[in-house]
Image (cartoon, rainbow, N blue to C red):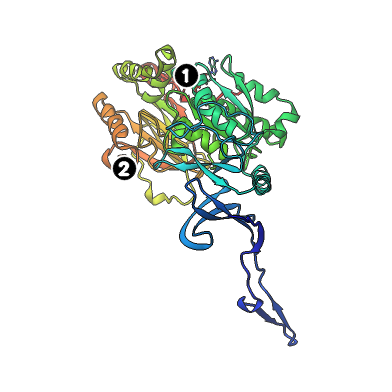
Amino acid sequence: MDEVDIEKQPLNDLHPSDTKSTVIVSEDGDATIIHPKVETHTILSAIIKSTDGKFHRLSFDETDKKLELLLLKGDSTPTKYKMSINFSEIVAIRNSRVKLGRNGLPRVPPPEDTIADKKHPNAIFIYYAVRKNVYIWRIREAVILFTTTHDKKQWIDLLQTALREYEPRPKSLLIFINPYGGKGKAKSIYDKQVDPILALANIKRRVVLTERANHAYDILQEIEKDEWTTIDGVVSVGGDGLFNECLCSIVIRIQIENEKDIRDINVAALAKPPFRFGIIGAGSANSIVSSVHGVDDCPTAAVHIAIGSKCSVDVCTVHEGQNLLRISANAISYGWLGDVLRDSERYRYLGPIRYQWSALRTTIRHPYYFGRIAFCLNDGETAKQIELPECKKPCEYCEGSKSDPLYPYHWTTDFTHIICCVIPCVSPFTPYGLAPNTGVGDGTMDLALLPRVSRCTNLSVMRKVAMYGGKNLASLENSLHCYRVKRWSFTPGALVSPQNADHDPKAIRQGAWNLDGGKLK
Ligand SMILES: Nc1ncnc2c1ncn2[C@@H]1O[C@H](COP(=O)(O)OP(=O)(O)OP(=O)(O)O)[C@@H](O)[C@H]1O
């Protein structure tokens, strides 16, 4: 091949006659012709070779940010075989090669990309994200060979500049690692499976190893304005607890900056953080990252962070009277599950097995708690779908002595479970998710209520959730009631008056609330 040409071509080379024009005639008979805007794409192209010696036409669509390789027969006749790589999938475009392991990941952070590859000095190496199966993502390499160093230089400058300026890609990240999260392997997971990918994507990283609970919270509150405005994202390498701690701190700081009172339960909408969050699931349950990606595979999460994938996630605020207690993007549980999770904190040194151990202890104790749940249905849910069981008497709401327009529905009874899911809550214990309906970022919460049941029924419900997920559970279990809500409240021991407190001491016993959120100071 003697010649490599770089040329600009408009893709939509439409003749005015090809486009439909609109004619608007005014009342006095004047006609105005409106020509629709024709969007033009600038495409640069060149003839290149692949490593197997075949010719291809390389095209770069500057508007759509897309690369296309079209296989040629000989050195000019196009064939039907082509491959395209979107900029949204590209991790890196380099002069020099990076060794990928058999697992499709760089083994060590690659060296600076300053000198050309010794073996292929006229080559450009493109590293892009590929889906290995439904959930797992890895990195693949494409090598593009130019005939002259000049052409290669022109192209690499062009492509690297375009990639640098590609808006969705993060350029600078603040990373928190909880060295004690999960099985205590967060640091080595980061070093081996995450850092090489972020380094390959040329992302600036400030890494902080947390030294105590709430360390990440404090750093995010105290960070200087200069750094705060330049970071593109905060990544937590740990479990749901560390993620929620970062989330809580950032959400609170943003509300203060936007002069919103987050303590006010009626505040219309919270201000959105200006940057994104990433999670590398190095904790025990990793339910947030598993709900978002369907899997808690760390390299998959790192690849998504590197290429700037994004999705919206809902958060909920938890208040007690006028105080904001927590912010959470996960599940809130009270009753058996809340007690299991609270008890498991005492056995953190056991690692993830602590959950099974605490489940056994709590089942023996068989807790149930008395109180009134009141809620407001999500917009779009109709009252017809609501069949609330009868309350235990006496109930102030049923008798009409009390009511709250914010929460039109209520149920007063003994509860074995009150579980609220903000996201589907996929975890090793609930591989098909805990929530029956709610999705990631759909603006709803699921509220699941299980009144007092026997130990066997409770275990059977938990077994069914673990085996089949929460989706169809309500139809299998008559006693389970699930609602899609936008706000709800719980008043423990609502039936208890000083007179009957002696009569039923269980009525005033309170369970533990559990949610993976940083506490507001
Ligand atoms: N260095 C540290 N020492 C002690 N506690 C810490 C430290 N760093 C963070 N924490 C706290 O530990 C809690 C739990 O951490 P994390 O969520 O990372 O792990 P995990 O509990 O094993 O995972 P999961 O929440 O998925 O079960 C967090 O709420 C965080 O505040």
Q: Residue furthest front?
A: 2
| Residue 170 image point, x, y percent | 63, 37
Asked whether, in this view, residue 260 is left or right of residue 383, the answer is right
Q: Nearer the viewer, mark 1 or mark 2?
A: 1
Residue picked out by circle 1: 185
Front residue of this view, candidates 506 and 12: 12
| Residue 57 image point, x, y percent | 55, 57
Residue type pointed to by label 2: Asn
26 versus 391 height, above or below: below
Residue type pointed to by label 1: Lys
Residue 420's quadrant in the figure?
A: top left
| Residue 426 image point, x, y percent | 40, 34
Q: Residue at x 66, y 72 (%)?
A: 36
Q: Quadrant of the N terminus?
A: bottom right
Residue picked out by circle 2: 472
Mark 1 element type = loop
Q: Residue furthest bottom?
A: 29
Q: Is residue 74 visible?
A: yes
Q: Is residue 489 visible?
A: no
